[in-house]
Amino acid sequence: MIVCFSGTGNSWRVARDLAAGLGEPAPVSVPRWERERVEGREADRLVLVFPVYSFGPPRMLMETIRRLDRVRARQVYAVATAGGTPGGALAILDRRLRERGAVVRAGWILTEWDKWFNRLDGRIRQIVQDIREERAAPLPGSNLLFDAVSPLLHQGFCRRVGGYGKRFRVTADCTRCGLCARLCPAGNITQATGERPVWGDRCEACFACYAWCPARAIQFGWAKRLVPVFTAPGVGAQDLVDLKNR
């Protein structure tokens, strides 16, 4: 089973290509994984694909693992996508999984450099081969300093991130299409018919709403879209809506 959290589509693209290479079904969302676990279904091989937020995994993924009584998959792998320094994201995930009886057998970090230098497809093929051959490897990180401070910074992020939703606002350009509410992987955006979207207090800071708004009507804070967020090539907003609903 491949479990994916994605806002702008980068992790989804990786998860999709891993599923194709491994002959796995389409990736499922984190909430879907939790539901299947509650219903007693557990895959023998688990691949977690996610973006790095503040040197760690998304809060939703960490909280989902915390709620599980045990992770029984025989093999667990992790693939993180990072726009900047990944810090100790894989080690943070591994510690949480160990609390639930699982260990990350091997992990990989894919960065923007891999895209810019056309290395991404080759790295994904290598990951597929490594997983097929059940290879184990030490988890990569950044450096001793970032790896040491990552847990503290990530814990602070997880405590605050829910309130990030209150920083989003819409301009007069909003067409009330509802795409942001359909996209939000946390279900944090509500929108009554004909009204503007409203953000709650369960934000994951994935910026899906901001990145995919067709009218570019969503702002973060009071700046006029000065925060650069890039969507993944070859991925559409509907792909992420489907992931959420799958």
Image (spheres, grey):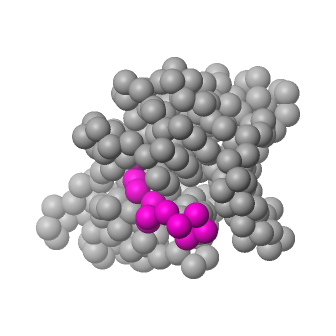
- Which residue is located at x 76 percent, y 23 percent? 148
Quadrant for the C terminus in the image = bottom left
Is residue 151 toward the left or the right of residue 155 in the image? right
User: Which of 124/84 is in front?
Assistant: 124
Q: Is residue 189 visible?
A: yes
**In the image as oriented, which residue stretches furthest toward the front?**
133
In the rendered image, residue 24 lying in the magenta stretch gets the answer: yes
Image location (x, y in percent) of residue 182: 30, 64
User: Which of 88/178 is in front?
Assistant: 88
Is residue 136 toward the left or the right of residue 241 in the image? right
Is residue 22 toward the left or the right of residue 29 in the image? right
Q: Which residues are magenta?
A: 20-30
Image location (x, y in percent) of residue 219: 47, 60
Chief secondary structure of the magenta portion: loop
- Which residue is located at x 80 percent, y 62 percent? 113
Quadrant in the picture for residue 175: bottom left
- Which residue is located at x 45 percent, y 60 percent? 27
Image location (x, y in percent) of residue 70: 42, 26
In the rendered image, residue 95 lying in the magenta stretch gets the answer: no
Vertical arrangement, residue 97 with respect to residue 124, above or below: above
- Which residue is located at x 51 percent, y 46 percent? 46
Quadrant in the picture for residue 10: bottom right
How many numbered marks appear? 0
Quadrant in the picture for residue 191: bottom left
